[in-house]
Amino acid sequence: MNPHELKKVEKQFTKGLLDIVILSFLRSESMHGYKIITNIRRSFGIYFGPSTIYPYLNNLKEQGYIKSQWDTNNDRPRKVYSLTPEGSNILTGAEQSFNSICSRLSRMGLSRLPVNNNIRNNVMIDQVGMQ
């Protein structure tokens, strides 16, 4: 697979996990949308713009997994997102599911997947921010 095709596949996988990625970033700290975009780019080397990220944030908020409030302490007001207890619970379940899926794929012969019984110590997952 050439590097361009590989990057395209990585972007598709990452987009499929964006809700989990966002929740995991918010587990460690509350942040505004632009910081989430920046963290995704820094962690994955992939850019998802506001037109991608904000619909995810709105959906997560509607589901009750995150909440938002306006931070007016800076030069310009920003909406800051934080994880709710329900969001924390769903993230824990998602981690367990993801670990189970990786284990099954590994048993199917995809032996290069980094599978670990404790997903929080998995290097690939640490890049996502699930610590």
Image (cartoon, helix red, strand yellow):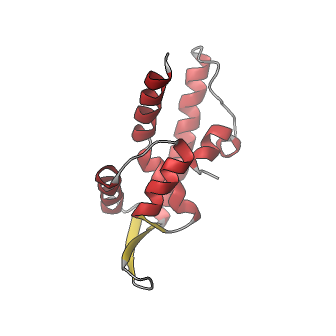
At 32% from the left and 49% from the top, the residue drawn is 52
As drawn, is 57 to the left or to the right of 102?
A: left
Q: What is the tally of numbered marks visible in this picture?
A: 0
Q: Is residue 97 above or below residue 106?
A: below
Give 126 or 39, whichever is nearer the viewer. 39
At 38% from the left and 75% from the top, the residue drawn is 78
Give 116 or 78, whichever is nearer the viewer. 78
Horizontal and vertical percent position of residue 86: 45, 61
At 44% from the left and 41% from the top, the residue drawn is 17
At 47% from the left and 29% from the top, the residue drawn is 7
Give 116 or 40, whichever is nearer the viewer. 40
As drawn, is 64 to the left or to the right of 91?
A: left
Horizontal and vertical percent position of residue 4: 45, 25
Horizontal and vertical percent position of residue 98: 53, 37
Horizontal and vertical percent position of residue 30: 50, 69
- Quarter holding residue 34: bottom left
As drawn, is 53 to the left or to the right of 85?
A: left
Give 62 or 37, whichever is nearer the viewer. 37
